[in-house]
Image (tube, rainbow, N blue to C red):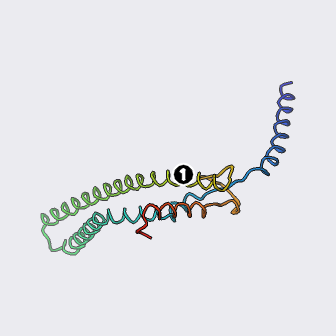
Amino acid sequence: MKNTAFGMLAALVLGVALQGPTAAAAELKLGYVDAVRLLEESPQAREATRKLKEEFAPREDEINRLQEQVKKMEDALARDAAVMSEAERRNQGLEVMSRKRELTRMQEAFREDVNIRRNDALSGLQDLIKETIQEVGASGGYDLIFFESIAYANSKLDITDEVLKGLTRRYQAASPQKR
């Protein structure tokens, strides 16, 4: 009895599901936005990336200098180890290890700081992207716009270019001197 009732219910749900979406889909205007593309191509994202590179360039240069210094110290130790006393080898080995630890700490702090700043910049940009998508949706008469996590979508539904244009207009309006 339970199996029959379940089977009838499943058939009813399947029947409604098969008829419902076709009628409803004909009336819906759908679109999707490629989030990754917006985060790569929008002028706001490019500006944020430029500012991050500019802000962190001195620290990155310092890390690169320390890497070169450690490499030179390792090369010198390997090259001259045969003619050094045991104490000199040990002291230089300890110095190399100390510099490597310092380098590792600097790299970790650098990555952490960059990630924090990038996340701050992206959170503001994501809010702006969502606002722009809502504007494009309202002005374009869209019923539903998908954003992020799309397994498949026909390219005819892609409205990323429209959203990029909206973001560009907003960027230019906010900073006319940068055109």
Q: Residue at x 15, y 74 (%)?
A: 83
Query: Is 4 on the left or on the right of 63, as rendered?
Result: right
In which image quadrant can residue 115 be found? bottom left
What residue occupies the far top of the structure in this picture? 1
Q: Nearer the viewer, residue 47 or 109?
A: 47
**Residue 78 appears at what percent x and percent y?**
23, 72
**Residue 1 appears at what percent x and percent y?**
87, 24
Please tell me how crowded label 1 is: few (under 14), some (14-19), or many (20+) other residues with Cα within 10 Å: some
Q: What's the amino acid at mark 1? A: Glu
Q: Residue at x 81, y 37 (%)?
A: 13
Q: Nearer the viewer, residue 158 or 136?
A: 136
**Residue 137 appears at what percent x and percent y?**
63, 53
Query: Is 100 on the left or on the right of 19, as rendered?
Result: left
The residue tagged 1 is 131
Task: State whether residue 133 is above or below residue 71.
Answer: above
**Residue 88 appears at what percent x and percent y?**
13, 66
Query: Is 16 on the left or on the right of 139, as rendered?
Result: right
Q: Nearer the viewer, residue 19 or 169?
A: 169
- Tell me the quadrant of the picture where the C terminus can be found: bottom left
In which image quadrant can residue 37 be found? bottom right
Q: Residue at x 77, y 50 (%)?
A: 27
Q: Secondary structure at mark 1?
A: helix
Q: Nearer the viewer, residue 28 or 90?
A: 28
